[in-house]
Amino acid sequence: MDRGVLRVILLAVFLISATSDPVKKEQKVDIYSFYINSTVTSRYATTVITSRVANRLNKPQDIFFEVKIPKNTFISKFRMTINGKRYDGVVKEKPQRHSVQVVSPRQPSAGLIKSVGRTLEDIKTSVNVAPGGKVTFELTYEELLKRRLGKYELLIYAQPMQTVEDFKIYVHIHEKPGISFLEVKGDLSTNDLATAIKTTRADKDAWVTFYPTRDQQTKCKDCDKNGLKGYLLITYDVERQNPNGEMTVSNGYFVHNFAPSGLPRISKNVVFIIDRSGSMGGKKMWQTRLALLRILSDLAEDDHFGLITFDHQIELWKPELLKATEANLDDAKSFVKNIEDRGYTDINAAVLEGVKMINRHPQEGTASILILLTDGDPTTGEKYLTRIMSNVRKAIGSKFPLYCLGFGYDVSFDFLTKMSLENNGVARRIYEDYDADLQLQGFYDEVAVPLLTDIQLNYIGVSYLTQTNFTLYSNGSEIVVSGKITDNNVESISTEVIAISKGNKVTYHDAVITKDVTDVLPKDFMERLWAHLRVKQLLDKDPKEEALKLSLKYQFVTPLTSMFVTRPQNYWVTQKVGSQSIHSGAPSLTCDMLWLTPSDCEEGIPLDFPRSPVSHDDYDFHLKRPVFHASFYFAAGFNSNRFMLPADGQSKPLCFDVLLHHKLRLLEDSSREFYMNGESQTTETGFSKIAFHYKKTHNLTITTNSISYRNDKDNVDLLWGQNFALSYTDGVDLILTHNKIDVSMGDFSVSVLLHKNEGRVYLWPAVQQYPQDGSPTGIFGKYNISYEKAHEFNNPTLKIMDKNVNVRWVYLKDSTKHSTPNVHCWLVPFDDVMNRNISDFIVTQI
Ligand SMILES: *[C@@H]1O[C@H](CO)[C@@H](O)[C@H](O)[C@H]1NC(C)=O
Ligand SMILES: *[C@@H]1O[C@H](CO)[C@@H](O)[C@H](O)[C@H]1NC(C)=O
Ligand SMILES: *[C@@H]1O[C@H](CO)[C@@H](O)[C@H](O)[C@H]1NC(C)=O
């Protein structure tokens, strides 16, 4: 099965828990029509989701629009139609977080669509609708499909949350050179639903329609009485008769798709630089070894390769690149099987060593590639990111590409992206997941067969070109250049591609007439395609002014912009929120930063992996599966909460356990009159209630059901699932979004997360900011403890505050993130690390 597919299925499973929102169940809404309409031309896909919903209750209620769309798309339009009146979204520069203020009740409230990256991202908004009223939501997003391993993929996800009378997915693909193959996959194309799908093909066009009946909507995999849930993956490629590529010109803009096939493979010089620092321990290391073993098996015999592993020390498999002969591969495989995690992360030295290795090797007629895999920031050696980048840039000197693979979420992905782009490569995130080894291998496959190097594309009579120089063209990919035709009178434009194939210069020439009468595209189509590609490329560069300018001009929601929707004044709100609403007499949500719940999708999908194989014989090559040793890691017991202590400058954090049944002082700074206390659940980990008290007047109580805030003037009661922001002049800010509330009180700022995992519901605080000059107490009061390692083996011991302490290597589920990733830590006895007895932290009243 395809990697993308695996990931999406997992996401679908994950959604089951995410959607069991008690607030929504009370609603009686009828989605009577749900359409997804996608049009693809010249690989540019424009998708419109239209949802028509009626309020069937005899009282007003909030009606939600919640969809998931693929990342890499730009939202370009959002519209709500209520009682025939349209409310259109406008893309504006994204506000700084601090500009969230309580808006005056006379102003219409503003919604906001934000963009975050991941395979799919959540888009969510709501509007209050009168009894019996109707609303139509319409969301448009655009994307340029990228060719990978010989195909384009259009992903369409549908989950209307109930069965729908009139449900349609309609896809039209039009490709001028002709469509060479088309395949519809995905969980919506299986079993009972297969008959609802119809595929029609002509030479240049293909149509895929999916019109399931209400009955069919309950019958797919993962579907139930709540209707469809799943995706269609439409995969296709185009004919490539013309080796010069395909030029499409329309309304003063052009796009050039260049993907010659039939070229000989160039042999590679590839060096893998593998992070083996402590944080790579366990599953990540195991998956990395597995992927490397498979990649090594795929090398061609005339390829040369090198392996570097690093922590604070650098280890070379062999000092030189060696030919991928069977004997060398066998030797390399046993080296790979013995890679163990340990130590710190010296990225700078490791990459420079890789560059040296390639530079020492003859490169004539070959393609050199450097691949860095890391899961963390540099923690030793050169630690300044800008200096590492400049060292690497100087060393590589644009001679070959550097690809960076960032494993998991501890890694500074911005840094890896910048560094790879500066060196003509790309960065890819490897999600910490059961298929991480496949993700790694999949990335390698995309660059595994180089066909051309040093590619330069030239055009005459055009300007505002997107990127035109590329270091490498691999089989199955595609080079896309778009630009504006400056001379309107020009009858044709000529293209020239110069590149190196196996040490020989090759050129491609072509000329196309600018007025193609046979293939008329919508007026601004090509201009938008150009703008999309240009913004994508500019977003990776600094400064970002032009990217912002174009995003605003073409109304793209990008990381720099947000979409604002002015919604109808909300007279129907049934709950009172904030002091403002009381004064106005027309209650309204004060400031609703609606949208999108960045929390769940942002951080990857958690997978339980209680035991990690650690030694080199952890993969059984006969059984083709990992062999698990006896449990090396211990999860927190059923009757305790495990807390993490980020250790200053150490790669491995400390942690300790506290028994449940306690009301605890979590964080206190009496000089600032700040107190945060928590009550644990009696039988399960996590907190059932967390309370904040600040300057005697501000009191905030958070439970797993509701949030209540009191001061001397206001009473605010909220439910999880609402979106809300509140700000007071004495430094108190509360921002509630979906299942997280950000609490700022003076110099402290804490996010409290609502977790719903495997039927368990609990709260967990993540302290985001401590005062610079404070000495807080409480369970979370210690935040940069330092220690030294005394012994490592058999009886691990740490030296903490001049005392030798026996520790155990354990893991905890890090509840400061919604994905609760497993984090390894040294488990220390509470008294030893806090220097006090637990009774000093117990309170009677939270
Ligand atoms: C889908 O969108 C296209 C382009 O906007 C439009 O021509 C077509 O009628 C739409 N089809 C459906 C079924 O809504
Ligand atoms: C490139 O890919 C195509 C399609 O998969 C294949 O037919 C061709 O042999 C490949 N070329 C090389 C050099 O591997
Ligand atoms: C592209 O490469 C050519 C040849 O190396 C160089 O002269 C030109 O400046 C490069 N263009 C850009 C935009 O980097």
Image: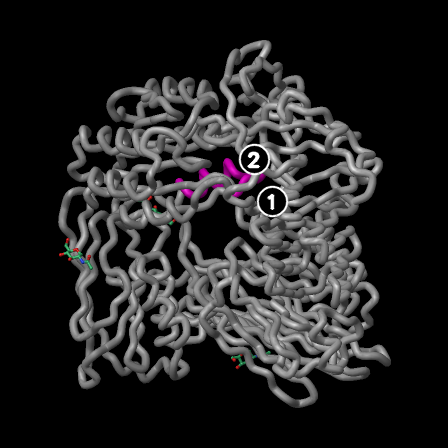
- Residue drawn at the location 69% of the way across and 44% of the way down: 764
Q: Is disc 1 surrounded by few (<14), some (14 to 19) or many (20+) residues within 10 Å?
A: some
Q: Which residues are magenta?
A: 431-444
Residue behind mark 2: 783
Please say whether residue 438 is one of the residues in the magenta stretch.
yes
**Total label count?**
2
Q: Position of residue 842 (x, y in %)?
A: 77, 34
In-front residue for pair 725/217:
725
Per the image, label 2 sits on a secondary structure element best described as loop
- Residue drawn at the location 64% of the way across and 59% of the way down: 734
The reply to whether the C-beta atoms of the residues labelled 1 and 2 are less than 8 Å apart is yes
Q: Is disc 2 surrounded by few (<14), some (14 to 19) or many (20+) residues within 10 Å?
A: some
Question: Which numbered circle lies on residue 429?
Answer: none
Residue behind mark 1: 767
Q: Position of residue 771 (x, y in %)?
A: 54, 45
Residue at the bottom extreme of this rendering: 84
Compared with residue 676, is residue 487 higher up or lower down, i.e. above or below?
Answer: below
Quarter occupied by residue 25: bottom right
Per the image, label 1 sits on a secondary structure element best described as strand
Q: Position of residue 712 (x, y in %)?
A: 75, 64
Kind of residue sitting beneath label 1:
Val
Kind of residue sitting beneath label 2:
Tyr
Compared with residue 121, is residue 9 higher up or lower down, i.e. above or below?
Answer: above
Residue at the top extreme of this rendering: 794
> Does any atom of ligand 3 lie closer than 8 Å to the CB of label 2?
no
- Secondary structure character of the magenta stretch overall: helix
Q: Is residue 805 visible?
A: yes
Q: Position of residue 397 (x, y in %)?
A: 19, 43
In-front residue for pair 655/832:
832
